[in-house]
Image (cartoon, grey):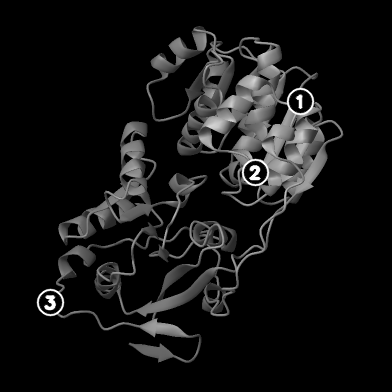
């Protein structure tokens, strides 16, 4: 291994017996570039001054028992083992319980879902109105995760939810809506489709949640969000959670929210616990060989690899599996069931490597990711920050490596 002093890049010399020329020789390979891709200087992918000091834990002002929640919710919290709220939960829950609109700014993985679900459950406990809660999320995976959390915290309360997302048979989802769930959780595109079909009525909605709002806007969902919000009653509570407050989000909340109270517990944009570096490679063949060598090392325990295109991600996961590195892939061409199986295999440590596109990986909450590898550089620096935020969580250290062309 050699250091390139120009920007601390790594040059690897992989094993000669790794024959990948056939794999990398096809025109286009993995690295299909989009026309709007930012030119990010390699130095922005490097941070060797990693903070390893122990975090000062957040001292919450409340215990969950202190919140004005009913006995059924408190029983579920105790059963699950929740007693100490995170910062966003500690500060946002009391405001939401009072009925105020809330803007919650917090990093992914800080407990935002619980921060809006508990006030929703309290409201539903008092008034079990059908189709009174609408939760909008950017991806299928995040919508499914929210639904799983809802079921966990509403145990024994006889409250029901429906998940409506793309990539799944819409007829089944129509039947779910017609059964009359209390909570509808969905992605903007599918929600708008159901509205256009006159299947879903939003006249009873009294709580509207926008989760990962910045991601939804990044993905181009603003027109769908506006169309859906226009169907909602003006008298409602709106809870908006985001990692960033951009000018577009600011305009959005001005249109959708009434005198919102802002709770910001967001930490610095780049995790202090992620050691970041670059790796230089000569060409596509060399790039794959380097990746295989890295993944065979013991310290690469649970690795999330990012690629740029759906085709490239699937091809890379297949190639790694063919070289005795079992891998799963998640991307937009996978069905919801396939994506769920791949994600579960990774979470349950049945495979050590998950290869994903940015869109598929948004909103995923995966614990104990040891490394993030940017096989293809991200479209924007914000995407890079989002990618590396999958590791180095909860005060733990993590590592991020970005492949770049040799200079």
Q: Name the residue under label 3.
A: 17
Q: Distance between the residues labelled 1 and 2?
A: 26 Å
The answer for how far apart the CA atoms under marks 2 and 3 are is 53 Å
Provide residue 183's location: percent of width, then percent of height: 58, 19
Q: Which quarter of the figure is the C terminus placed in?
A: bottom left
Residue at image mark 1: 237
Residue 399 visible in the picture: yes
The residue lying toward the viewer, choosing from 267 and 187, is 267
How far apart in space, not on screen, are marks 1 and 3 (Cα)?
61 Å
Locate residue 112: give its quadrant.
top right
Disc 3, SS: loop
Q: Pinpoint residue 9: horizontal percent, then vertical percent.
A: 44, 83
Q: Earlier in the sequence, mark 2 or mark 3?
A: 3
Q: Which residue is drawn at 44% across and 70% down?
A: 402
- State the residue at coordinates (27%, 48%): 350
What is the residue that sits farthest to the top in this orientation?
Answer: 179
Q: Tag 3 or tag 1, which sits nearer the N-term? A: 3
Label 2 neighbour load within 10 Å: few <14, some 14-19, many 20+:
some
Which label was assigned to residue 84?
Answer: 2
Please name whichever residue, 69 or 349, is drawn nearer the observer in this view of the structure: 69
- The nearer-to-camera label among 2 and 3 is 2
Closest to the camera, between mark 1 and mark 3, is 1
């Amino acid at each position: 291994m050699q250091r390139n002093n120009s920007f601390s890049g790594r040059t690897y010399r992989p094993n000669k017996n790794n024959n990948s020329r056939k794999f990398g020789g096809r025109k286009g390979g993995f690295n299909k570039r989009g026309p709007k891709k930012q030119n990010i200087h390699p130095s922005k992918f490097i941070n060797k001054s990693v903070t390893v000091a122990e975090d000062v834990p957040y001292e919450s002002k409340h215990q969950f028992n202190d919140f004005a929640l009913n006995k059924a919710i408190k029983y579920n919290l105790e059963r699950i083992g929740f007693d100490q709220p995170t910062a966003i939960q500690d500060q946002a829950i009391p405001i939401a319980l009072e009925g105020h609109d809330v803007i919650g700014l917090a990093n992914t993985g800080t407990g935002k879902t619980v921060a809006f679900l508990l006030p929703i459950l309290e409201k539903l406990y008092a008034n079990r109105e059908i189709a009174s809660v609408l939760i909008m999320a950017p991806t299928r995976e995040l919508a499914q995760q929210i639904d799983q959390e809802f079921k966990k915290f509403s145990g024994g309360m006889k409250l029901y939810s429906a998940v409506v997302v793309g990539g799944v048979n819409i007829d089944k989802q129509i039947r779910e809506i017609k059964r009359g769930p209390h909570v509808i959780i969905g992605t903007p595109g599918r929600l708008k489709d159901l509205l256009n079909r006159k299947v879903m009525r939003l006249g009873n909605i009294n709580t509207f949640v926008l989760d990962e709002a910045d991601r939804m806007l990044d993905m181009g969902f603003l027109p769908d969000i506006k169309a859906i919000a226009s169907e909602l009653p003006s008298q409602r509570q709106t809870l908006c959670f985001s990692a960033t407050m951009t000018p577009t989000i600011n305009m959005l909340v001005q249109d959708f929210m009434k005198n919102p109270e802002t709770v910001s517990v967001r930490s610095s944009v780049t995790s202090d616990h992620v050691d970041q570096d670059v790796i230089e490679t000569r060409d596509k063949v060399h790039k794959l060989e380097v990746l295989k060598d890295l993944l065979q090392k013991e310290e690469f325990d649970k690795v999330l690899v990012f690629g740029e295109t759906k085709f490239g991600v699937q091809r890379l996961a297949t190639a790694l599996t063919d070289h005795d590195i079992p891998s799963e892939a998640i991307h937009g061409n996978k069905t919801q069931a396939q994506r769920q199986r791949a994600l579960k295999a990774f979470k349950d440590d049945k495979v050590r490597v998950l290869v994903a596109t940015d869109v598929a990986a948004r909103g995923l909450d995966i614990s104990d990711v040891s490394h993030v590898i940017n096989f293809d550089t991200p479209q924007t620096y914000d995407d890079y920050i989002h990618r590396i935020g999958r590791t180095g969580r909860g005060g733990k250290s993590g590592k991020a490596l970005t492949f770049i062309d040799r200079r």
